[in-house]
Amino acid sequence: MTKIGIGVVGGGYMGKAHSVAMAAVGAVFDTKLRPVLQTIAASSAQSAERYRASYGYERAARDWHDLVHDPKVEAVVIASPQDTHEAIAREAIALGKPVLCEKPIADTLEGARKMVELAEGANVPNMVGFNYIRTPASRFAHDLIQAGEIGDITWFRCEHTEDFLSDPNLPKNWRCEGMATGNMGDLAPHPVNAALRLMGPIERVMAEVETVHKTRPGGQVTNDDHAQIMCRFENGVMGHIYSSRVATGRKMGYAYEIHGTKGSIRFDQEDQNAIWLYRTEGPEAERGFRKILTGPKHPDYLPFCQGPGHGTGYQDMIIIEAKDFLEAIETGEARFPTFRDGLAVAEVIDAAIRSSNTGTWVDLPDVLGGAS
């Protein structure tokens, strides 16, 4: 067992989640590397001190530069606003420190490409925070597909729908400025990541990106509210991806449906401990979707609980993420999703925006080839 000093940039929603995960991961997964909550940075030194006291860090940094250069910080977790990710990651990589970065790894496609080049060139362990695809249920769905349990895939649909900006009378806030914090920067990357993980590379896209509520009390909205993406995968399968922050009634609608020649799979993050599986076997009158509750026989479930159906939660996904990050550092072997997987998502998002602007299909370059 070896201790490793962790520095987290950001103490809010995701900063707290990563702090809790790093404090718990050793006990849950019995990891060989045991995190020490070394240093935390926030928007101000005062905020950092408040988070230090709340989360149990040894030190509050003056700013993120101070944190990254702290010699006791041996790995950096970036959970700050999207437009800060690239600069922090660049500095950490230059110092040879492993980086776990919330998506996106950069707020431009060129920046994402540079992040991959720098991280791979320096041989620094790197991961992107796509946590939803890590649930035991979605891991199980991935394994079923790879094993051919539902036959040859014929169709794929995925969505990430929430309603936190569905009310047009809600005042304009920071989420309403800049593409990195709009739907295409914030929500769309998650279903795109799911599509790439479950189905493989995307060959081309046709998309519509739209701002539903163009003005709000306080001013003009400069980014998008929802988008639909028709896609054709390299394996020939057609698919559809939808994301929205104005989907009234949806709180965590990260959901997918996959049809195959031998069956189908359905999943909804609002019921994250279940997979619905249909098999084309037996008498027609007895066929139907079967609800499978996750349990100790499913990936990454047993360390949390020995009881089938007892379930995991949102925080547990971040703990799984922390475990994978520590294993990547310990073994020197990449763990999904790497910066290259983050770049693949950025390529699809960029192509979708270009498609919406031109009204045409847009081909994707081959950017996969990261960790399996």
Image: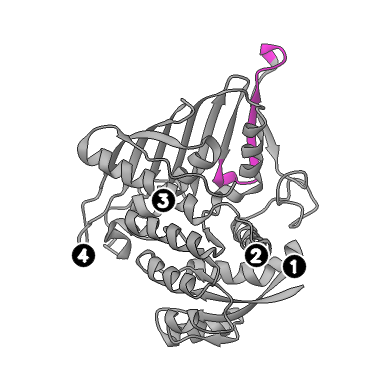
Q: CA distance from mark 1 to mark 4?
A: 51 Å
209 versus 289 height, above or below: below
From the image, state whether disc 3 or disc 1 is nearer to you: 1
Res. 162 in view: no
**Callout 3: few (<14), some (14-19), or many (20+) C-alpha neighbours within 10 Å?**
many
- Give the residue type that dot 4 points to: Gly
Residue in the picture at 21% in, 41% down: 357
Q: What residue is at 48 percent from the left and 85 percent from the top?
A: 61
Which segment did they paint magenta? 268-285
Identify the residue position indicated by label 3 in the image: 187
Label 2 vs label 4, nearer the camera: 2
Mark 1 vs mark 4: give the one in front. Answer: 1
Mark 2 and mark 4 in contact? Answer it, CB < 8 Å: no
Instruction: State the residue position of label 1.
Output: 32
Q: Secondary structure at mark 4?
A: loop
Tell me the residue at 35%/66% (across/down).
83
Label 2 to label 1: alpha-carbon separation: 8 Å
Q: What is the x, y in percent for residue 19?
A: 58, 72
Q: Is residue 253 left or right of residue 261?
A: left
The kind of residue tagged 2 is Leu
Residue for badge 2: 326
Task: Give the spatial CA distance, label 3 vs label 2.
Answer: 26 Å
Q: Earlier in the sequence, mark 3 or mark 1?
A: 1
Q: Amino acid at mark 1?
A: Lys
